[in-house]
Structure formats: C-alpha cells, structure tokens
Amino acid sequence: MRPLAQGSWGFPVGKRSHGVIFAFLLLLLLVAGVWALAVGQYALSLREVGEVFLGRSTETAQVVILGVRLPRVLAAALVGAALALAGAAYQTLFRNPLAAPDVLGASAGAGFGASLAILLSLPLLLVQWMAFLGGLLAVGLVYLVARMVRRHDPVLVLVLSGVAVGTLFSSGISLVKVLADPSVQLPSLTFWLMGGLNGVNAQVLPPLAALVALGALPLFLLRWRLNLLSLPDEEALALGANVAALRAGVVASATLMTAAAVSVTGIIGWVGLVVPHAARLLVGPELSRLLPASALLGGGFLLVADTLARTLAAMEIPLGILTALVGVPAFLFLLARGGRG
C-alpha cells in the first residue's frame, strides 16, 4: 500500500492523487473562467464566446468579452490567487490557522490610502496607487516596530504590532468617512471598502500581474525552506535555516501581493483565511503542494464569487459581502471537519 500524506485536519491524501487534484483544480479554474465570460446582462453561448477568440463574432460581442469581461476574469483569478498565497504563507509563518493577509495591517493601510485619495477627489489610477502605497506603509511600520522591540518573541511582536497599526489605519478610515462629502465621496468610499472588480480594465492587468508575480516567485523558490518556519525557531535554526531572513522574505512577498490585490479590488476578506485551509485539506501542509493548490483554489473561488456578484441581482453585490457570506459557512464547515479528524 502506498503511503498517505495527511491533511492538516486528518484528511488522508494519496501521493499519486496530488497530480489528479491539481489537474482538477486547474480544470475548475478554466471552467469558471469560461462561465464568467459567457454570463451577464449580455449573455453569450459557449459557441459565441469561442467565436470571439477566433475573430468571427460581432463587434458587440468582442467589446463585451475582450474589453470588459476578460480583464475582469483575469484580475479575479490573479487577486484570488494572490490573497490565498499570502494567507498560506502567513499561516505557516505565524504557525496560526487564523492568520490572514491583513494580519499585519496591509488591508487597513491600503484602505486608508484609497480613502484619502477619494477624499482628495483623485482619479481612479491614483486611488489604486495610494492604496498600494498605504498597504506597504502599514506593514513597513509594523516591521519597524518589530525590529525595535527585541525583548519578546518576534512572531508575537509582529502580530501585536500588526493589530495596533491596523487599528490605527482603520481609525484613519473612519476619520476620512466623517470628513467626506456624504453625497458623492462617502458612497464611493463605502463601495470601495466593500470590495469589487467593477473598476478593473485592461490597463490595470500588467502592473497587477507583475506585482503578484514578484511577490509569489520568492515563495515558490523558497518553498522547501519555508516549511522550516512551521517549527519553533530553535529547531529551525538547528536545521540551518536563517529564520530572520526567511521571515522577512515571507512578510515582504505576502505584503506585496496583498497590497497589489487590495489596491485594485478594495478590501476582500475571507479568501486568504479560508482557501489555504481548504487547500491544506486536499494536499496537506507541505508548501510545495500547498502554495500551488492555494493559488488555483483562490483564483477559482474569487472568480466564481465575482461572477455571482454581478449576476445574482439587478445591481452588482459588493464582492466583500459575498465572500463573507460564502467564507463564514465554509470556514465553520472546515472547522467542524477538522474537529472530527
């Protein structure tokens, strides 16, 4: 009998089946992408979607697919993958199943940057860049505090500093809400904070893809050594790991991906918390399998959620609300499943 890899909550996975699982997740992502291209207010059949890419369709269908839906589909897959990768990395780094991409204040910092830009009536491109810089600034402050406080456990200091800095930037968002024009700026600010992909266009994709790739690449290259971060520091050091450098690399990579994602979509919760747990249930905790599984599952999850957000009702449902409605029951199910394991 072949040995079995064990999921984090006791779900047995045969090694031979990992390839099948990755193929299945990739197929799900592709099916979700085709479905997202076809449905919407201007519905198209699968044959019509195919004709668009073959150059045989009407001009209207080309505009709808290539100009509107395809950038949104690609952005959803990128953002979902980025948030899931960041969540998986942070859960390993902090050895805490409740760690999420916003644990170090990146989302709150990005939210504050975007809020400030909206208050100043800046164009959308500057709103996105200020959100990105706000996310980097928040995590930079957290890391600076952690470097200054050396008498306590460094992981604990990082987490507590993240909570404090995140709260500070959240207070800044509240202040901006008070100062914003209630008829114009406040609705825009509120809708942005609830998350959505309605502002995505083709121009956003190249920088988003580049930043996500820049953050994801070190995680994949160092995936074997990052497994050591799940051990106590003393054991990881005894095995030859440079714990401080690895920890800094994980924080930088995850922050870059989180800030890039939030700057485009606003604050979207639960993806980075729930998806790594589901992926771990399928392929186990080893990062060489967990990272690609999380990326595929996160991209597919956000793609499906975004398609539902724009098709379930006459008006688009904010994506952050929908991911919470799906993510909370899913998290509780996984928690109950783990308890039985």
Image (tube, rainbow, N blue to C red):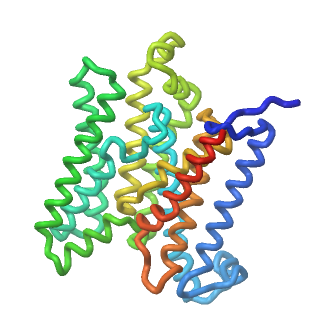
Q: Which residue lies most toward the left here?
A: 179
One can see residue 66 in this view: yes
Q: Position of residue 293 (x, y in %)?
A: 62, 46
**The C terminus - image quarter:** top right
Residue 197 located left or right of residue 175: right
Q: Is residue 138 above or below residue 174?
A: above
Residue 303 located left or right of residue 133: right
**The N terminus - image quarter:** top right
In this view, the residue in front, 202 or 37, is 37
Residue 47 located left or right of residue 313: right
Q: Position of residue 304 (x, y in %)?
A: 57, 67
Q: Is residue 166 above or below residue 227?
A: below
Q: Position of residue 85 (x, y in %)?
A: 51, 45
One can see residue 293 in this view: no
In this view, the residue in front, 183 or 113, is 183
Q: Which residue lies most toward the top here?
A: 238
Residue 74 located left or right of residue 140: right
Residue drawn 27% across and 69% down? 190
Residue drawn 31% across and 32% down? 158
Residue drawn 38% across and 53% down? 260
In this view, the residue in front, 30 or 87, is 87
Quarter of the image where one finds residue 38: bottom right
Residue drawn 45% across and 51% down? 210
Q: Position of residue 333 (x, y in %)?
A: 58, 53
Q: Which residue lies most toward the right here?
A: 1
Q: How many marks?
A: 0
Quarter of the image where one finds residue 263: bottom left
